[in-house]
Structure formats: structure tokens, C-alpha cells
Image (cartoon, rainbow, N blue to C red):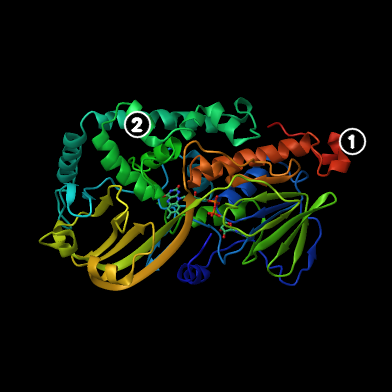
């Protein structure tokens, strides 16, 4: 993942308590059992589930390697105007049960987004084709304006809105199967099997456009509001595969929340809770199978031996060398450019008479000539002093920012290797990369990319590891004859 310097520098200064210890002076560490590459939500929740589903005798240690100076990965904050804003994953759905339980377990405070009277506009490059009513700051009429805006949306999209809602609800209902009791839920060896079991696989094989048209949504709703949402959440239009698209639509439901202080605290807390060792600022360069162990080499010149290795990061743009080589389908990542600006948008750029007429959220239809996907107000300090978050598919040139904003006090740019470029029919990498004990959590990411889907995938991979260890899946081809007891306990997964 390409991380911009500015974010990296800021995050380095964030202090939090973790049980991590540096291994700069350690050349070889004796047999840590499970090595995890990546300290995002995938790696941290994997450590948590491994610890929760096993006893201490089963796993001697878990060591997480994180190349950046902080944990959290794509859950990261930036500081603008002295305030912290989510720069990556910003909202969590009210039915994301793992994230909810993590927040409870870790005593993290949830910040629920108010379903307020924020205005929305859909910009086509020349004009707003749809706009709701803006509310003056500190107005007492928020609820009325909010109701009025709902009526305006309903008037434009009519019954299609309800059909969209029903479609999203049906998909969320299928997803909830992943929270069933362990006994009711198989351990899945492939992503395809996992999706088929929940009734979600077919949605990865068709586009969102196809599915929504079949569900009876009007073309107007699909090409306007739905497109605005998929462009904001995944930087893509409705040709996105339908499962990722529907997850993105669920991201506009009410009741969305985030962790006060930053969603990255979920990862920090889970690593702490699972007693995993954390090697911060240490990038893994190679993973080699040597006898019954894997040997990991890092940028610090250190090497580590582990019986099990888990990649909890997209491998697509990484240069980790695997020996013997592994094979994963080629996947294109979507780069999303996030630009934070403190200042004021220029009403002239939008052909308006006053900046008060500019909606709080400017969404866009699909047009390759449009230089941005969305612009949203993050915080209002005064009527002409705000912090905005701009999403775009490529970097917005300085001159263009000067046209878009009448005043710019602070600008922070980030370039995320954000999520897969979703494309139906999706093909999935394997959870088990070598048939032994090399695993890949982010194989699931081609279904959808969220905090919760990472946790759901990590839970399954944790169960898969424990099941295979307990059932005597050899850690080495020469150990095929070993008895189950030599691999520790039997797990009831
Ligand atoms: C702009 C943006 C907005 C988003 N919005 C939302 C949202 O609102 N809600 C939501 O739920 N999701 C959202 N997402 C998606 C969500 O952030 C991701 O799906 C999720 O955080 C992925 O977690 P992960 O642990 O699988 O991967 P990552 O978070 O990418 O973690 C992987 C970690 O591995 C580390 N790493 C990589 N290579 C190595 C190596 N060789 N050695 C050591 N460490 C390594 C990386 O530094 C990184 O910390 C958004 C993503 C982006 C980019």
C-alpha cells in the first residue's frame, strides 16, 4: 500500500500502548509459531480470533509485522486544523457485529453519525442535476429540513428507493449468517465456498447495474444516486461487481458509526488484547519454506522462523518474494486520492451565486472528464472556514484546486492503494496459498473491502488454521505420518 509521507509522519507521532517490542537487535527469533504480515484490521482480528478460539498450549506465540510506524493500515487518521479526521475507513455499519463486539470488548467509545440535515447535490460537471436544501449553521429547523430533503429524494426517485432499500436489506441478511454460532457454521477452505454458503457468491459474478435493473430500480436512480454512492465508497461506477456495490450502498444507511479517536484503535486494541508481539516499522521482504518452517526476512536484516504464516495485506502491489513461488490471480487495485482542504469552496466554480448554496456533500455522476468523485464537508469552523474531504481517481493538480477553492489554508494529499478494482465475474485467490500453512486473509477482499469483511475473513482463516493444525495437516510434507496429538489439541470449530 502506497502511504503518503505526510500521513506516515503524522501517524508516527500518535502515541498508543501496545505490547510490541522492537527486534532490531534480534537476528533470529526461536520458533514463533504464527507470523502475521500486516497490522491492519485483518491481521489484528486474526490474532484476536486465534487467541480466542485456542488455548495457550495450542499457539506458542503470535508475531505481527507492520511495515508502517503505526497499526491500523487503511484505518488511519490525519490531522487538519488541529483536529483528527478519518483518512481511510471512516464509517462502520450498525450491523457489523464483529466491529461492534470489538469496540465493546476494548471499551472504545462509538461516535454515531447524526442523520442530520446535511445537504446533497449531484454534479455533472456543468450543473447540479439534483440538490437538496442546505441548512444555515446552528439552525433550529434541522429535523424539518431533513424531512423535507427526504421528500425531495423520494419525489425524484419514487418507488425505486424502496426497491433499493429492500435489495440492500436482503444482502445484509445473507451476510448476517457469518455471525451464526460456530457449530452452525462450517470452516471454509475457499472464498467461493464461503460466499456460496451465505448465498452471496452470485452477486460477485454480475455487475451492480445488472442486479439493480433486475430488482426493478429505475435507470435514473442507478445512474444518479447509486452511482454517487459507489463513486464515493469505491471510486467506481455501477459496473462494479454487485456484492461490493451493495456493500457500498449499505454504507449510506442510517446509524453509521466510527470509533472516537480513530478506527485504527480497533487494531491497536485487538493486538494488545491478543498478547501478540508487534514488530512495528518492520517490512517483510521474503517468505521461504525451509524444512518444516517458514523463514521470513525483513528490511532490518532480521530473520524469523514460524510454523504458520498469514498474509493479512493485499499482495497485489507488494514485492514480497515467496519461495516456492505462490500463484494468485492478477488483481488491479483502485487508487483513491484523498485530499483534505481547510478553506472554502468557490461558488463560482459550481456556477452558483453564493457559497451558501453549495451542498455539504457534492457527489458526481460517472463522467471520465470529472476531476473528482466527491467533496464532503468534514467540519465547519465558521461560515467561511471548513474542512473538506475530496475523493478523486487521480491527483488533483494545484491549479485546479485553486479554481475549486476560493481560499485554501491547509491541503493534505493521500494516495491510497485503496481496494480491489471490482470487476464481475470476480475470481478469488485461495485462503491457503501453498496447501501447507501459508494463508491469505485478503483473498476475501475481492468480494468487498471493509473493516467488517476483513474481520469476517480473518475469523474464518483463524478457524481454518486451528482446524488444520488440529487435524494433523502437516506443517511439512515429510510429516504426513505424524499423529494428531503432535500438533496439539483438537479444536471444536
Ligand atoms: C479511502 C478509503 C476509504 C474507506 N472507507 C471505508 C469505510 O468507510 N468503512 C469500511 O468499513 N471500510 C472502508 N475502507 C476499506 C477498509 O479500510 C479496508 O477494507 C480495511 O481496512 C482493510 O484492512 P486490512 O487489514 O485487510 O488491510 P490494511 O488495512 O491495508 O492492512 C495491511 C497492513 O499490512 C501492512 N503491510 C503491507 N505489506 C507489509 C509487509 N511486507 N510487511 C509488514 N507489513 C506490511 C500495511 O502497512 C498495512 O498496515 C476504506 C478504504 C479506503 C482506502
Residue 94: x percent and y percent?
A: 41, 40
Q: Residue at x 31, y 43 (%)?
A: 227
**Looking at the image, which residue sits at the far bottom?**
409
Kindly tell me whether residue 284 is visible in this rendering. yes
Say whether residue 194 is left or right of residue 422. Answer: right
- Give the crowd class for mark 1: few <14, some 14-19, many >=20 residues within 10 Å: few
- Residue 329, compared with residue 357, is above or below; it is above
Kindly tell me whether residue 75 is visible in this rendering. no
- Give the crowd class for mark 2: few <14, some 14-19, many >=20 residues within 10 Å: many
Say whether residue 377 is left or right of residue 51. Answer: left
Say whether residue 187 is left or right of residue 468. Answer: left
Q: Quadrant of residue 433?
A: top right
- Which sits in the foreground, 309 or 396? 396
**Closer to the eye: label 1 or 2:** 2
**For the residue labelled by badge 2, is the local secondary structure a helix, a strand or a loop?**
helix
Question: Which residue was labeled with disc 2?
Answer: 212
Which numbered disc covers residue 215? none
CA distance separating discs 1 and 2: 52 Å
Count all numbered tags in the image, as a single digit: 2
**For the residue labelled by badge 1, is the local secondary structure a helix, a strand or a loop?**
loop
**Looking at the image, which residue sits at the far left?**
353
Residue 192: x percent and y percent?
A: 58, 33
Question: Which residue was labeled with disc 1?
Answer: 481
**Which of disc 2 and disc 1 is earlier in sequence?**
2
Q: Is mark 1 within 8 Å of ligand 1?
A: no
Residue 129: x percent and y percent?
A: 18, 47
- Residue 409, compared with residue 476, is above or below; it is below
Rendered-image quadrant of the C terminus: top right
Residue 387: x percent and y percent?
A: 29, 64
Say whether residue 54 is left or right of residue 429. Answer: right
Amino acid at each position: 500500500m502506497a502511504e503518503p509521507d505526510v500521513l506516515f509522519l503524522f501517524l508516527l507521532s500518535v502515541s498508543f500502548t501496545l505490547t510490541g517490542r522492537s527486534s532490531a537487535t534480534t537476528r533470529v527469533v526461536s520458533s514463533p509459531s504464527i507470523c502475521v504480515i500486516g497490522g491492519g484490521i485483518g491481521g489484528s482480528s486474526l490474532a484476536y480470533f486465534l487467541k480466542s478460539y485456542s488455548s495457550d498450549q495450542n499457539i506458542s506465540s503470535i508475531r505481527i509485522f507492520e511495515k508502517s510506524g503505526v497499526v491500523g493500515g487503511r484505518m488511519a487518521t490525519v490531522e487538519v486544523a488541529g483536529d483528527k479526521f478519518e483518512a481511510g475507513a471512516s464509517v462502520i455499519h450498525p450491523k457489523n457485529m464483529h466491529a461492534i463486539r470489538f469496540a465493546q470488548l476494548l471499551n472504545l467509545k462509538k461516535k454515531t453519525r447524526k442523520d442530520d440535515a446535511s445537504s446533497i447535490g449531484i454534479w455533472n460537471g456543468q450543473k447540479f442535476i439534483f440538490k437538496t436544501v442546505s441548512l444555515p449553521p446552528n439552525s433550529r429547523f434541522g429535523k424539518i429540513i431533513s424531512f423535507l430533503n427526504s421528500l425531495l429524494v423520494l419525489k425524484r426517485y419514487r418507488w425505486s428507493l424502496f426497491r433499493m432499500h429492500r435489495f440492500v436489506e436482503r444482502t445484509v441478511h445473507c451476510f448476517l449468517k457469518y455471525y451464526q454460532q460456530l457449530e452452525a457454521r462450517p470452516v471454509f477452505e475457499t472464498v467461493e465456498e464461503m460466499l456460496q454458503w451465505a448465498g452471496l457468491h452470485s452477486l460477485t459474478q454480475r455487475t451492480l447495474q445488472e442486479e439493480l435493473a433486475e430488482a426493478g430500480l429505475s435507470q435514473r436512480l442507478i445512474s444518479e444516486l447509486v452511482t454517487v454512492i459507489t463513486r464515493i465508497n469505491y471510486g467506481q461506477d455501477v459496473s462494479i461487481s454487485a456484492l461490493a456495490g451493495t456493500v457500498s450502498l449499505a454504507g449510506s444507511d442510517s446509524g453509521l458509526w466510527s470509533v472516537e479517536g480513530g478506527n485504527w484503535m480497533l487494531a491497536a486494541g485487538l493486538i494488545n488484547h491478543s498478547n501478540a508481539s508487534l514488530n512495528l516499522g518492520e517490512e517483510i521482504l521474503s517468505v521461504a519454506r525451509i524444512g518444516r518452517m517458514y523463514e521470513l526476512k525483513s528490511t532490518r536484516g532480521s530473520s524469523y522462523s514460524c510454523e504458520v504464516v498469514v498474509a493479512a495485506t493485499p499482495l497485489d502491489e507488494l514485492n514480497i518474494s515467496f519461495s516456492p513461488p505462490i500463484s494468485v490471480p492478477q488483481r488491479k487495485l483502485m487508487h483513491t486520492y484523498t485530499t483534505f482542504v481547510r478553506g472554502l469552496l468557490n461558488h463560482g466554480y459550481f456556477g452558483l451565486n453564493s457559497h451558501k448554496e453549495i451542498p455539504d456533500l457534492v457527489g458526481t455522476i460517472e463522467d471520465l472528464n470529472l476531476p473528482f468523485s466527491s467533496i464532503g464537508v468534514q467540519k465547519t469552523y465558521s461560515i467561511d472556514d471548513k474542512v473538506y474531504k475530496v475523493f478523486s481517481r487521480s491527483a488533483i493538480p494545484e491549479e485546479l484546486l485553486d479554481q475549486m477553492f476560493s481560499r485554501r489554508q491547509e491541503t493534505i494529499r493521500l494516495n491510497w492503494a485503496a481496494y480491489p478494482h471490482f470487476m464481475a465475474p470476480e475470481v478469488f485467490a485461495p485462503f491457503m496459498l501453498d496447501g501447507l500453512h501459508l494463508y491469505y486473509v485478503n483473498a476475501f477482499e475481492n468480494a468487498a473491502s471493509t473493516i467488517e469483511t476483513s474481520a469476517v475473513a480473518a475469523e474464518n482463516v483463524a478457524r481454518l488454521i486451528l482446524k488444520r493444525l488440529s487435524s494433523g495437516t502437516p506443517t511439512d510434507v515429510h510429516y504426513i505420518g505424524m499423529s494428531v496429538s503432535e500438533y496439539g489439541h483438537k479444536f471444536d470449530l
